[in-house]
Amino acid sequence: MDCRRCQKVKQEKLNWLADSPFYTKRFAFYVGRRCRDASIRDVAQELHLDWKTVKALEKQYMQEQLRRAGAPGPKVIGIDEISLRKGHTYRIVVSDLLRMRPIWFGGKDRSEESLDLFFQWLGPKKSQRIRLAVMDMWKAFRNSTTKNAPEAAILFDKFHILRHLGEALDKVRKREYARLSGKKREFIKGQKYNLLSHRENLSLDGRASLKKLFRVNKRLYTAYLLRESFGQLWTYEKEGWARKFFDNWCASLKWQRLKPFEEFVRMIERHWDGIATFCQRENKVSLGFVEGLNNKIRVIQRRAYGLRDEEYIRLKVLTCMLKKI
């Protein structure tokens, strides 16, 4: 027997090659950087590549981003859910609010058991070090956090609370539209965007339109002013001052017949402890990051529309706030 046939063939590993032997890592990273600002299809057309190749190279790029970012050890976390597709298919996103980056994407829904998976992934030692958890008022998130990170204070996210208040204002708009008729009803039609937007974000036409509406409908005017003023609650540094503001705000509702706002007040009363947590100096965190992350995730979902690769979506979310490499 020829001994030469028995010799094993050794293949040298070249660290400058990508996982695909047809492309260098440098090229793979270029593709990854382009995909941060454009869709897979657009990058594939630009570089004359198959879209599957572009997606594979981008995934390699994102995996390297996560490797370089290192293992997380968060002290302050933000917990939110995103909807992958219609039919209430949810996944949970957990972020490190001090380092301002998502660190976990997973679960099967937005249940307590799904969030438990995050704490299992993080480990009991690191979970014990979490001092603050920012979330919406979803009971399952609160229960899981209290159980797995007992040292963490619970803070309910300002933007989720204001979203509930916006929904209350929209219910008032719908009820007024149903109650009225004729010309007074016409003033309300098509005003949803103007009512739910902050005044400083409106065009001159939008402001003029609202002014006409408020001239003929005092109830909507009162509801609008109450919604606009509620954000002042988060400016106080002592719980007593915040509570006094809230009590005065509630007193303004008397005799106004704004039932959706009265329901909102009852919800705030039930969750007051998690709202007042923000008054403590050590719990002052940048809540704007959470809203910014949500906007980025919406962009990711639009660009990845139609893709069924959940691992790809996970990598996109976890790397969207990381620096380019």
Image (spheres, helix red, strand yellow):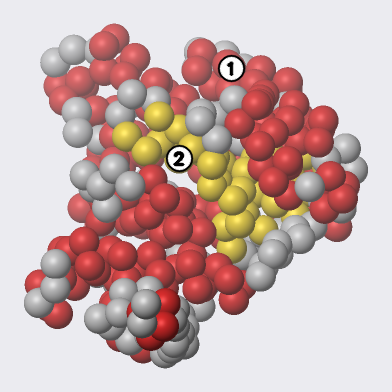
Q: Which residue is mark 1?
A: 262
Whether residue 169 is visible here, answered yes or no, is no
Q: Is residue 140 left or right of residue 307?
A: right
Count of numbered tags: 2
Q: CA distance from mark 2 to mark 1?
A: 28 Å
Q: Is residue 289 left or right of residue 174?
A: right
Q: Quadrant of the N terminus?
A: bottom left
Image coords of residue 62 (percent x, y): 44, 68
Between residues 2 and 254, which one lies in front from this camera angle? 2
Question: Which quadrant holds residue 144?
Answer: top right
**Figure check: 325 above or below 121:** below
Which residue ends up furthest to the front in the rendered image? 1
Q: Nearer the viewer, mark 2 or mark 1?
A: 2
**Figure check: 8 above or below 204:** below
- Residue 2's tag is none
Whether residue 143 is visible here, answered yes or no, is yes
Image coords of residue 185 (percent x, y): 20, 20
Q: Which residue is mark 2?
A: 82
Q: Secondary structure at mark 2?
A: strand
Q: Is residue 127 left or right of residue 231?
A: right
* Residue drawn at the location 59% of the way across and 63% of the way down: 101
**Figure check: 154 above or below 130:** above
Q: Secondary structure at mark 1?
A: helix
- Check disc 2 and give the amino acid type: Ile
Question: Which quadrant holds residue 30?
Answer: bottom left
Between residues 106 and 208, which one lies in front from this camera angle? 106
- Check disc 1 and give the amino acid type: Glu
* Residue drawn at the location 34% of the way across and 56% of the way down: 300
* Residue drawn at the location 45% of the way across and 58% of the way down: 315
Query: Which numbered disc, 2 or 1, marks the residue that appears first in the sequence?
Result: 2
C-beta proximity under 8 Å, tags 2 and 1: no
